[in-house]
Image (spheres, coloured by chain):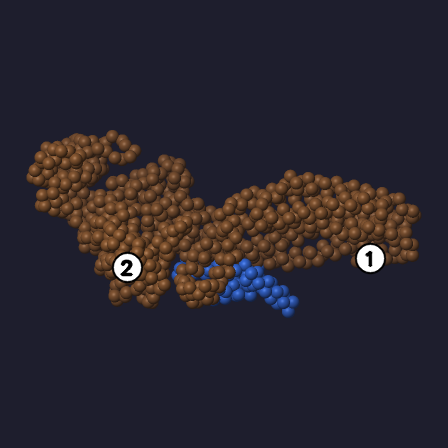
Amino acid sequence: MPTRIKKINISAFRGIPDLELNLNGKGLLLKGDNGTGKSSIVDALEFFFCGRVRHLEGVQGVSLQRHGPHIGYSSNDVKVCVTFDPGEVELTRTFNVEPACPEILREYFGVTQTGVFILRRAQILEFIISQPAERFRAIGNIMGLEDLDNIELAMMHTRDNLEVDFNGKSELIKNSFRQLSGILGKEVKSEVEVLGALNDILKAGGLPLIKSLGEAERHAEKMLQKAKGQEAVQRVGRLERLSLELKSVVVDKEGIVKASDKANEKIKGLLGEQRKKEMSVAALLEVGAKVLEGWGENTCPLCQQEINGGELLERIRVRLGTVKALSQNASEVRRECAGIKQKLEEILKTLGGIVPKSKEFGELAENNEVLSEQIDSIRRFMKSIETAGAAEGIIPVATLKEMLTRTQELVGSSIKEYDGLFDAQKIMDAEKEVLRVVALIGQTKSIVENISKTNMELKSTGRRLAIARNIYSKFTSIKKNKVQGIFDIMQADIEKYYGLLHPGDAHKNIRMRSTKRASVELKIESFGRKDEDPRAYGSEGHLDSLGLCIFLVLVKKFNNACLLVVLDDVVTTVDVGHRENICRLLIEEFGDKQLVITTHEGLWYEQLRSHHRAAKVDGNFSYIAATKWDVDAGPTIRPYKPRWGRIEEKLGDGDKSAGNDARSYMEWALESICNALESPIVFRSSREWNVGELFSSAKKRAESLIKGNGFKEKVLKAFKELECTTIYANITSHNNPLAEELSIDEVGNFCRAVHNLYCTFLCPNCGSMLIYSRNFKIIRCSNTKCDKPFEVKAS
Amino acid sequence: MGIKEEIFELFFSALEGEKEVPELTVRELKQLKECGELISEAKLLGLIERGCQDANENKED
């Protein structure tokens, strides 16, 4: 036998000093005006199951700890006990103790702890108007996807970081070949081409050729031996090597500026104060989660106060989810900035190495000073790249361009200076040529060796990257397909429910798509336009209906182990006709659930009751009303008395205010009749009509629509009786001094006329409202399960 | 079977049929999941590296 709540006891919690609600496993329909404490009962249920009250979270100055206890009570007094059947299992939640859930209730609590058994008015649009990522968190949390999402994120980061490593190494190799092209005076892209270019130089100098780069060093040594002992020649050799190093400097201005623009685009979205705050706690949250995972005690590891470790850990994980989405962008920024930094560091490394080595050449002192200043300027600029890498500021691209142009110019002018000095040295041209070639061979060899080493590393990183890509792509595509499969089923159910609530509506083809990681798009076809945002053409009532449908589908699909469903004042924007459909949906699809429905609206309450009676499920519900509230006693809960019962009671007591109640009963009854008969009525966007409009429209429609059988006469008689007594309604409803003159009998006549008219439109067999069927040209009982439905012909 | 379990089952069977991913990597990833340990970036990188190393050694043998 499935678990149901038998009893709820609430002590010292949010407007309730002490309250016992006996549900006896039944559903609950709770009516109460604003401020009578009905939502506090919902809060108490959420506190009991989840240890939190969601609408008290995230609001500055408001917290469960401070605002959970009732006025005049402390947090130690707060207690919510729930008794479950079967087994009479009584569990208690306080601020310090969470319910000790027995094995038999494990699955039930597994569902309720997600909090997705309660839908409040304020939360109803969460599924509709959220950003795709927030919607995914709302839905993914229910589906248990949060863990999977974190794993997918870790896989993606592993792939991305290996990709950065791989790309960095590839870029290094490309740069090295660019360097070689510069010093060999010819574009080279492979070691074979390097050998060819080197031999071209040797040939031009009339020097012997080499077969492989391995020979190059030996070759250079031989040539050097010829010049050995000549100090001047060696000095010039050093100068030539420095000149070659200068020629190998690559200032990739275009690439660096492009990467900076790309990084800046991302950084702009990461600069907000709130985002910064979120990002700044990421490390703290990660450490906190790790500590709590291994802690296993219900005391805070820092201050030793009692905590709910499981709940805290869950909340940290939810926050980490938000932070991780931001960190994805941040990691892309880090990657771009790391690439820029690497290129600038290469420039610094080469220039920084040349300046001290060239000090022995006094002629270059002035040039070296300018180069040193430029090196300092690049070093200073590196700080901007570090700041940008941490998403704390954008890269000043204009300054960067200027700095790179200046560096290019300086490198060019320095090469001229060095080469000029080389040319001015008093050594033989042939010796100069040998030295130049020796220096060139030495540098080429060193660069080629670096390329070989990096190539080996690249191969190994490439292998790891291929594995990481494979793991990520397999996981992500399986997850996406599986999740989309569930969304497809869900969207079919959502559409089914939505179609029940809005039959023949211009809004259809609801689509949920998992387009990106951890996000869900929600689209709808409106007036023939496909894939529109639901907000594009949907009214507030339509959006609320859609939110309700999504919630109910989630409940149906994922809350099988728990019968409890709480709807707290969720239909305020939906009109009477569509509420009828909600009643049907709840009875037909959720008849097996333990529904707890609260409302401040008498009409909706009466509609639900009437549908329960019609479906013969009224025995499965407790009908109660919160009639008043005060700070000492809390809510006053009474068994619910139906509208007509209350009016009759007042009439019995001689209370003429029954006329007022009957007037609002009349408004509701006439609106229901107009709706049932599809009576034409003047369009009002507010959907509010006065009694005169409703009366005349309903009466005219009844006259023209209903055919014989005695029913038409009965209806028209009821309209006439009401018409004759309506004057009493006007007198009693506007503090009219004439009200005193009315007798209780006259008020009673009006009340009975209203009730009689309403009852005329109820099925004599099951008590459901009669409705007009345009297709069959009949007026018949609206209850499809009625075993003897009333039916009369219509024109 | 819950959605998580279904996804992991399909994922591991897809990885097992993939020659490019070393057996040791798949085995360790499975163990990590079965132990309920957090599958972090550092752990993933470690098991990929060990898998590559193991595959290289087997090749040399």
Q: Give chain B's shade.
A: blue
**Chain letter for the brown part:** A
Residue A137 as seen in the image, left or right of residue A661: right
Residue A413 shows in the view: yes
Residue A11 marker: 2
Chain letter behind tag 2: A
Which residue: 57% across, 53% down? A160
Label count reads 2
Which residue: 78% across, 49% down? A355
Helix or strand or loop: what does disc 2 sit on? strand
Q: Vertical placement of A297 versus A744: above or below? A: below
Q: Position of residue A245 (x, y in %)?
A: 78, 49
Residue A541 as seen in the image, left or right of residue A626: right
Which residue: 27% across, 46% down? A34
| Quadrant of the snapshot with the C terminus of chain A | top left
Q: Could you confirm whether marks 2 and 1 are on the same chain?
A: yes
Q: Nearer the viewer, residue A98 or A743?
A: A743
Pointers 2 and 1 in contact (C-beta within 8 Å): no
Q: Position of residue A454 (x, y in %)?
A: 69, 56
Q: Vertical placement of A24 versus A795: above or below? A: below
Three-letter residue code for mark 1: Glu
Three-letter residue code for mark 2: Ser
Which residue: 48% across, 55% down? A320
Instruction: Calculate the distance from the C-alpha at mark 2 to the C-alpha at mark 1.
Output: 90 Å
Say which residue label 1 marks: A217
Q: Position of residue A780 (x, y in %)?
A: 17, 41
Residue A789 shows in the view: no
Corner quadrant of residue A17: bottom left
Helix or strand or loop: what does disc 1 sit on? helix
Residue A78 as seen in the image, left or right of residue A228: left
Q: Vertical placement of A213 versus A768: above or below? A: below
